[in-house]
Image (tube, helix red, strand yellow):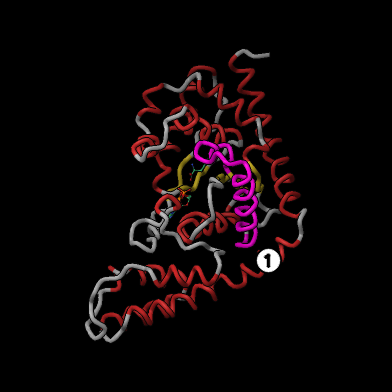
């Protein structure tokens, strides 16, 4: 089975990205042939700062490698190192109905937030279809927010196959229903766009300060509390063994727990959880050529597959 997923390098990766996308994607490495890429072409729809894009791409690559991505097993690459994807996107565009893209929630959300609606933002799902179809992926693990884009990919692939013959494999989305939405320090979904994140490898002092700002209710220390409604608890349970989170839940229900004390515990547990990965990241970062070499090797593997698919698609539509 072939599995593909990607993430945009558009800022520092945070706990929502880690628990919602990175960890599940890294776990899938053992279930099949995995392709994982940094969607820098996609990031260009919102990042217009070359130095920032380069830095975010390198940082995200280091983050994934530090968190357990095994580059011998997984083809790990930068999207822009596989230019076949953009050519394939053009061929797919010719069978993509405007209405299909006009219905995409993600596009509508972005323009409602005030992002200027350029063509790349509108065509974003067609590029995503090209990413997926180029390597003939069977399974695409994504968060709920990306499900519609995988459905669009399926529609485009079917339309192409019906028009020109069976070139593309139809992929299935694998929606991570079991991974809850990780809340940010303000209680909304943790997201770069809401400035409410806790970075995976942020400065420890800054992380502590952010944890201290986590919004909680005003129940007094002595009163019993409901762990299922507490942002702090939602983060705590991600970074401790099940037994420890059950124990804290018990203490919540019994009363006598102060949120300040739980925040301090969370700081320690979070630091301990990521400490081995942080050490690994520091080590990898010292080897200047390493990340680049990994990404180039991954791109070679992805290109080999993508160029075969592109050749089939070109032939099917009547290009030389
Ligand atoms: P952001 O909202 O910070 O811009 P992205 O939309 O780039 O994050 O998300 C990248 C990946 O991380 C997606 O697969 C998405 O489902 C996952 N993800 C992002 N935020 C969260 C969250 N708060 N909880 C769970 N998963 C998340
Ligand atoms: N749009 C995805 C996101 O923002 C990233 C992405 C780009 C992707 N191409 C993809 C995810 C192909 C899965 C498959 O999270």
* Residue 70 coordinates in the image, percent (x, y): 66, 57
Residue at image point 44% right, 67% down: 210
Q: Which residues are the magenta region?
A: 39-68
What predominant SS class does the magenta segment belong to?
helix
Q: Nearer the viewer, residue 152 or 137?
A: 152
Image check: 215 left or right of 124?
A: left
SS at mark 1 in the image: helix
Image check: 256 left or right of 247?
A: left
Q: Is residue 22 above or below residue 218?
A: above
Write down the quadrant of residue 98 in the picture: top left
Residue corresponding to mark 1: 282
Write down the quadrant of residue 301 in the picture: top right
Q: Nearer the viewer, residue 114 or 176?
A: 114
For disc 1, the neighbor class at 10 Å (few under 14, some 14 to 19, many from 20) is: few
Q: Is residue 261 above or below residue 9?
A: below
In the image, residue 52 lies in the stretch drawn in magenta: yes
* Residue 128 coordinates in the image, percent (x, y): 51, 35
Residue at image point 73% right, 44% down: 296
In the image, residue 223 lies in the stretch drawn in magenta: no
* Residue 125 coordinates in the image, percent (x, y): 47, 33
User: CB at mark 1 closer than 8 A to ligand 1?
Assistant: no
């Amino acid at each position: 089975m072939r599995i593909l997923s990607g993430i945009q390098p558009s800022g520092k990766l945070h706990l929502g990205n880690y628990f919602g996308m990175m960890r599940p994607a890294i776990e899938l490495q053992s279930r099949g042939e995995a392709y994982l890429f940094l969607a820098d072409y996609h990031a260009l729809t919102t990042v217009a700062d070359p130095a920032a894009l380069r830095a975010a791409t390198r940082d995200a690559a280091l983050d994934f490698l530090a968190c357990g991505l095994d580059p011998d097993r997984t083809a790990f690459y930068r999207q822009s190192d596989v230019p076949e994807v953009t050519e394939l996107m053009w061929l797919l565009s010719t069978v993509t109905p405007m209405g299909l893209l006009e219905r995409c929630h993600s596009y509508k959300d972005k323009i409602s937030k005030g992002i200027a609606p350029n063509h790349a933002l509108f065509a974003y799902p067609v590029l995503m279809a090209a990413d997926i179809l180029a390597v003939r992926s069977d399974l695409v693990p994504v968060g709920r927010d990306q499900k519609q884009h995988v459905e669009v990919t399926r529609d485009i692939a079917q339309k192409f196959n019906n028009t020109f013959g069976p070139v593309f494999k139809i992929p299935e989305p694998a929606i991570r229903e079991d991974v809850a939405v990780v809340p940010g320090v303000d209680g909304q979904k943790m997201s770069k766009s809401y400035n409410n994140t806790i970075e995976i490898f942020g400065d420890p002092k800054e992380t502590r300060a952010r944890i201290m700002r986590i919004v909680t209710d005003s129940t007094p220390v002595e009163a019993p509390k409901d762990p299922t409604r507490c942002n702090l608890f939602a983060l705590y349970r991600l970074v401790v063994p099940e037994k420890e989170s059950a124990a804290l839940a018990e203490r919540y229900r019994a009363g006598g727990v102060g949120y300040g004390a739980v925040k301090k515990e969370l700081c320690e547990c979070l630091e301990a959880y990521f400490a081995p990965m942080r050490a690994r990241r520091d080590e990898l970062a010292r080897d200047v050529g390493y990340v680049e070499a990994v990404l180039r090797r991954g791109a070679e593997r992805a290109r080999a597959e993508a160029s075969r698919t592109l050749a089939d698609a070109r032939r099917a539509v009547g290009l030389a």
